[in-house]
């Protein structure tokens, strides 16, 4: 039997808690490849959020996880007290074809995150914002239960929709903001029209629903309204891995920074998410996130204002 | 040998000339089907343009073309002097699968439009705006030559890119505004990124390039700028046939009405095109275009302003 997860890292109060996977990705796209690069929804989500807010990451890494990556996260300003070390590091090997739309999984090992009920540092429990990255909905529900009354955003993925549909629906029922990609929204609702799908998802319970459309931007649904966020007009897309996670992470980081969740602020958060996600795809792994700063994000936010004017 | 095409219909001065195909479409989608319904790039383009400007249609129909459709076009306010009657009516049979992205052609007969050098009514030659629907680029070039110094928009399609690539490029070199869909833009330029594709297409010669992205809206490129037009958030898409044609037709109709072609006006024209195209897809054939009026289009234009605000 594996050892009980231990809490490592430094402690401090956080505005936002990100729960998600961490691992090593080996990816090839028509524009290059990387081996054992930093990846996982928790990594992309917390790094993206860190541009805006003090973020704590609840995740697990293997005892073989390269220490350089842990110190990289700390240097990035992420609170790493919530990182548990246990078993073997999660590894994923994927490939994108020319259209870069969907990764083909070549090899994957079991994600320890899905097996364990991870301990959450006490200092995190006061955070007002929580982002649940795509994970086993039963584990998402366990984390969710520890943050009653907070503003919670949850993501999911095809695998969980197909294998634990009822549990996925139950999580979405209890969160404030649900993020999902276009194909998953269609699958979960049986609707071709993303507008119908979004409206159906709103009825599940969340106050806001964001449908991510990759290069085509995102749709935000709330009440009777829709916000159509354009995709950032990118010239270079090297690797879309993690773009959805950094989108949601940056969105939640922005909301936590503003400490507001009204419609106007959420619209702006969607644009911040799109800006950070666009950087994410310009290089492999977290490479581009390591190179940019808040001024770069603000500049892209300004371009988003220009490209939609008529 | 077929008889020389004869000019029929009533004459009057026109602001915009639309050159494109007319025919009868038999279409099935997951939401229903129609048989021998009015279709063709010339029909969709001229009807969409008519909401904004006096439009003359240069096309050909067979001697078997239902007279009710000709009177329908006249009642719609389209100048029909440029419609030649010759041979058999162009017929297309197509099918859309669940994703509604691309039609599968089941049956097609030769388009007479592609065989003939159609006569253009003298009264049309003073028009300041010309829209060349997707057609044999050699025929597009012949029509183009008769409208020197006008503001010309041209469309094309996969078939012509694959069979007469050099001729397609030559037409685009000589026009002011080029419209093309995303897949065609990628094919013509060899670029995955639509932004790179759009910029490459600008270098061919046109002052404006519009890349149509179906439900995801459109990208307008000019100089160093990009306008990202959202797709209208539709709940019902019954039949996307002709949406690209009505997009371009409405865009050109709006420009002809304003008699301006500056960047601000072209951005607005793209939104008008998107509004009319969105109606087009809500029902089969031209059914929805027959039901709407300018107030409906203005209302949708207003919604386009709301959904993009942040």
Image: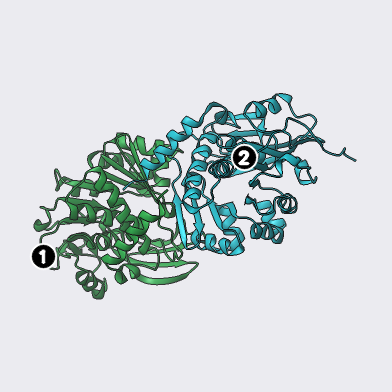
Chain colours: A green, B cyan
Viewport quadrant of the N terminus of chain B: top right
The residue shown at (39%, 72%) is A35
Q: Name the residue under label 1.
A: A11
- Element type at marker 1? loop
Q: Position of residue A242 (x, y in %)?
A: 35, 60
How far apart in space, not on screen, are marks 1 and 2 (Cα)? 64 Å
- Element type at marker 2? helix
Q: What is the tally of numbered marks visible in this picture?
A: 2
In the picture as drawn, the residue positioned furthest to the right comes out as B1
In this view of the protein, which residue sits in the foreground, B20 or A194?
B20
B285 on left or right of B270: right
Q: Where is residue B87 in the image (x, y as percent from the top left)?
A: 82, 36
Determine whether B124 is above or below B64 in the image.
Answer: below
A257 on left or right of B23: left
Asked if badge 1 and badge 2 are on a common chain, one would say no
Q: Position of residue B22 (x, y in %)?
A: 70, 37
Q: Mark 2 lies on which chain?
A: B
Q: Name the residue under label 2.
A: B45
In the picture as drawn, the residue positioned furthest to the bottom comes out as A68
In this view of the protein, which residue sits in the foreground, A1 or A237?
A237
A112 on left or right of B179: left
């Amino acid at each position: 039997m594996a050892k009980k997860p231990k809490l490592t890292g430094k402690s401090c109060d956080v505005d936002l808690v990100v729960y998600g996977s961490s691992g090593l990705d080996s990816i090839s796209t028509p524009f290059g490849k990387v081996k054992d690069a930093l990846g996982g929804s928790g990594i992309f989500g917390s790094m993206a959020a860190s541009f805006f807010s003090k973020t704590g990451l609840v995740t697990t890494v293997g005892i073989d996880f390269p220490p350089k990556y842990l110190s990289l996260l700390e240097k990035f300003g992420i609170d790493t007290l919530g990182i548990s070390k246990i078993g073997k590091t999660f590894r994923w090997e994927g490939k994108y074809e020319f259209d870069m739309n969907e990764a083909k999984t070549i090899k994957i090992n079991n994600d320890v995150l899905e097996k364990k009920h991870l301990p959450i540092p006490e200092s995190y429990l006061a955070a007002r914002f929580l982002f649940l990255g795509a994970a086993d909905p039963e584990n998402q529900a366990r984390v969710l239960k520890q943050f009653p009354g907070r503003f919670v955003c949850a993501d999911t993925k095809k695998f969980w929709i197909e294998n634990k549909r009822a549990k996925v629906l139950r999580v979405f029922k209890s969160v404030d903001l649900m993020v999902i990609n276009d194909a998953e929204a269609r699958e979960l609702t049986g609707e071709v029209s993303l507008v119908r799908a979004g409206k159906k998802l709103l009825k599940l319970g969340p106050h806001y629903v964001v449908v991510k459309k990759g290069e085509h931007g995102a749709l935000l649904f709330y009440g009777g309204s829709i916000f159509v966020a354009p995709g950032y007009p990118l010239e270079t897309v090297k690797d879309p891995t993690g773009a959805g996670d950094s989108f949601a992470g940056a969105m939640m980081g922005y909301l936590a920074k503003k400490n507001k969740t009204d419609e106007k602020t959420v619209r702006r958060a969607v644009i911040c998410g799109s800006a950070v996600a666009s950087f994410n795809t310009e290089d492999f792994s977290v490479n581009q996130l390591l190179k940019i700063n808040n001024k770069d994000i603000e500049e892209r936010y300004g371009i988003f204002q220009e490209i939609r004017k008529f």
